[in-house]
Amino acid sequence: MRTLRAIGTAVILALPLAFTAPATATAAAAPDISLAAVKAHLNEFQTIANANGGNRAHGRPGYLASANYVKGRLDAAGFTTTLQSFTYNGATGYNVIAEWTRAGDPNDVLMVGAHLDSVTAGPGINDNGSGSAAILETALEVARQNLTPAKRLRFAWWGAEELGLRGSQFYVNNLPAAERSRIKGYLNFDMVGSPNPGYFVYDGDNSDGTGSGPGPAGSAQLERTLQDYFTSIGVPTRGTDFDGRSDYGPFIAVGIPAGGTFTGAEGIKSSAQASLWGGTAGQAFDRCYHRSCDTTANINDTALDRNADAIAYAVWTIATATPPVVVWQDTFEADNGWTVNPGGTDTATTGAWERGDPAATTSSGAKQLGTTVSGSNDLVTGRLAGASAGDYDIDGGVTSVRSPEITLPTGGTLNLSLSWYLAHGSNSSSADYFRVSVVTSAGTTQVFQQLGAATNRNGAWATATANLSSYAGQTVRILIQAADASGASLVEAGVDDVKITR
C-alpha cells in the first residue's frame, strides 16, 4: 500500500422506505474461513522474506518466491493459473492470475485481488501479506467446496503495487476491450489485519460526500454487500475514499465497479474511532507500516479473521446468486412517457426536467454533467448550458417529472435502482433537494432524499436503490423532484438508468 486513504464518516438517511442492496435469488451460504489457515500463509511469506534479505519486494527473489508459493497452492487446488510478467525499473515483476474455470459465466466475471509485494524495508506481512493470504484461503475454499458460481471467479495477486500500482495497471492496460467488459466487479483487499484496526469499506456510492466521488455504477452494491456482513456480526464500518492509491485504481479508471475493505495504515486512530472499534487512540492503525517490524507479530487476529470471513461472504453472495430479473427499466434513449409537472404544481421558472443530451456546465467545479451513465440521453434539469452556468439551472422552486404506470408482479423481492446526482453552490441550503417517491392510488411515499447544504457540491453520478416489495401486485409511478428553494442558489440534478428488478 502506497499512502493512507482518505477516511470519511458514513451518512445514514432516515427514510420511510429502507434502502438496501439489490436483492438476488438465493445464494450459497458463505463458509467460515479458517484463521489458522490464513496465518499459515502469512508464516510462509515471513519464511520467504527471512530467506531473501528480509523482504518480498518487486524484482527481489523474495517476491518471485511468494508468487510461486501462491501459484503452487492454486495449481494443486485445480485453478487455471497464469504467472503474468512485466518489467518495471529494469526488473521483472509478476502478477498471479487464477481462474476457477469449472463453473460460472465467462462473460460475467467477479475479480478479487490483493497486492503481493512488500516494500524493500520489511517483509510486508500486514501490507499486504494479510490481503494476499486472506484471498488465497478464500480461493482454496472455493476449490474444496467445488463451488459452482453463476459468475466466473478470477483471483489476482499483483506485483509492484508499492511502486505505483504497476502490476494491476499492466494487467488492465493489456486487456482487450472485450475482456474488460466481461469483468463486472473487482474487490480489493489491501491491509486487512492492522494491529490497531479500523473497519473501513470503500465508499462506492459516495454517501460520505468527500474526496473522489462514487465508484463506477455497481460499486454501491459491492459496498453494501460488505457492509451487510459486518452488520451481521455487529461490527460498525466507516467509509474510505476511492482515492486511486491501491489496485482498484486501474479498474475504476476504465469503468469497472469496485469495492473492498481496509483496516488502516499510518493514519492515527481518533478517540471516536477507538470508542467505535476499541484499540488505542492517538496511535497509528499500523505503527509498522512500511517498516522492518511488519512481521507476523504485526497482525491483529480478530481483524484478520473478520475480514477473511467478509471476503468469503462477498464472494459467495455475489458470485453464486442468480441475477435478478428486470421488471421495468428506462435508460432515456427513447421517450417512454415520463410527464413533466404531472400535478400542475411546479414553481420552478427555469430548469424543468427534460429528456435529452445534456450540456456540461461548471461553476467552482462540475455542476451539470455532460456525460450520462449510459447512452446519449438522461433526465436532466434544463439540458442546455447557456452563456453562464446559471442560465438553465433550477430557479424559483420545484420541478418534477413522473414515470408512466408500472405494474409490479407479485412474489419475490422488488428493488428500484437509479443513477442520480445533485449539484449546487455554496449558497445552497437544506431547503434545496433531490427527491424520489413512489406514487400509488393511495398516495405518495418518499423513498430517497438528498438535501442541499451551504457547501459547494459538484455533480457526480451516484447510485441509489430502494426495496419496493411492499408494492408487489400494485400499479405504481416513480416521481422525481428537485428544488431550488434557497433564493438564488445554483442547483442542477440528473437521473439515468432507472430500473426495477425482482
Image (cartoon, rainbow, N blue to C red):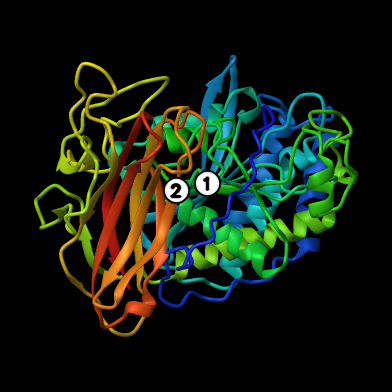
Name the residue beneath numbered marker 2.
Answer: 450
The three-letter amino acid code for the residue at tag 1 is Ser
Q: Quadrant of residue 282?
A: top right
Q: Quadrant of residue 381?
A: top left
Where in the figure is residue 4, as x and y percent of width and height? 69, 31
The disc, 2 or 1, on the residue closer to the chain's N-terminal end is 1
Where in the figure is residue 113, as x and y percent of width and height? 56, 46
* Picture layout, residue 481 above or below residue 119: below
Q: Secondary structure at mark 2?
A: strand
Locate the N terminus and report the quarter of the image it occupies: top right
The reply to whether the C-beta atoms of the residues labelled 2 and 1 are less than 8 Å apart is no
Where in the figure is residue 471, as x and y percent of width and height? 33, 78
Q: Quadrant of residue 12?
A: bottom right
The three-letter amino acid code for the residue at tag 2 is Gln
Which residue is painted at 83% across and 27% down in the image?
Answer: 53
* Picture layout, residue 14 above or below residue 391: below
Which residue is painted at 77% across and 42% down in the image?
Answer: 126
Which residue is painted at 74% across and 27% down in the image?
Answer: 119
In-image side of 200 versus 501 (left or right)? right
* Picture layout, residue 59 above or below residue 466: above
Name the residue beneath numbered marker 1.
Answer: 207
Which residue is painted at 43% across and 65% down in the image?
Answer: 102
- Residue 316, numbered circle: none
Q: Nearer the viewer, residue 279 or 11?
A: 11
* Picture layout, residue 406 above or below residue 6: below
Q: CA distance from mark 2 to mark 1?
A: 10 Å
Locate the C terminus and report the quarter of the image it occupies: bottom left
